[in-house]
Amino acid sequence: MTRIHAITLATRGQGLYEFTAEAEAFVASAGIGSGLLTVFVRHTSASLLIQENADPDVVADLQAFFSRLVPPASSPAMDYLVHRLEGPDDMPAHIKAALTQTSIGIPVHRGAMVLGRWQGLYLFEHRDRPHRREIVLALTT
């Protein structure tokens, strides 16, 4: 059996937005012992990460790294980009999403996600302006 639940996260621009608590609440409410939670983001300019959630410097460093790795289309280093209709952050957002992931599978055991002690679930917003991002949680037993 599969249970589906969608959550919507409001972003304030580029950055990582933790939603571990929302996923934990969904899994706990299902009342199952074991299964698989699939987490999927329904967008092409945002992605998902499992990352350390204990030290905020990790999140800041990841954001800084991806900004250097994939600068805005207005940067001379990105002159080769053709897709520019939605602004200088759009195609770089698609590239960042392609380098990361849009779905994650997490084992569930004894009614809880089997995450490591310092691991959390993050939406990685790659666009500059605020968005409302939909994340689908599918719990299969």
Image (tube, rainbow, N blue to C red):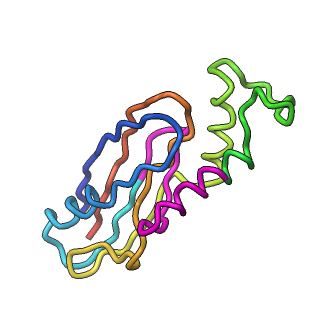
Residue at 86% from the left image edge and 29% from the top image edge: 79
Residue 8 percent location from the top left of the image: 31, 40
Residue 13 percent location from the top left of the image: 49, 35
Residue 104, magenta (yes or no): no
Residue 61 percent location from the top left of the image: 60, 58
- Is 50 left, or right, of 66 in this rendering? left
Residue 55, magenta (yes or no): yes
Q: Residue furthest top?
A: 85
Q: Nearer the viewer, residue 40 or 57?
A: 57
Residue at 53% from the left image edge and 39% from the top image edge: 14
Residue 7 percent location from the top left of the image: 29, 45
* Quadrant position of residue 117: bottom left
Q: Residue furthest bottom?
A: 110
Residue at 62% from the left image edge and 20% from the top image edge: 86
State which quarter of the image contains the N terminus: bottom left
From the viewer's perspective, is residue 58 above or below residue 82? below
Numbered label tally: 0
State which quarter of the image contains the C terminus: bottom left
- Is 121 left, or right, of 32 in this rendering? right
- Is 69 left, or right, of 135 in this rendering? right
Q: Nearer the viewer, residue 98 or 64?
A: 64
- Is 76 left, or right, of 100 in this rendering? right
For the magenta stretch, what is the residue range?
A: 40-64
Residue at 65% from the left image edge and 48% from the top image edge: 98
From the viewer's perspective, is residue 7 above or below residue 22? above
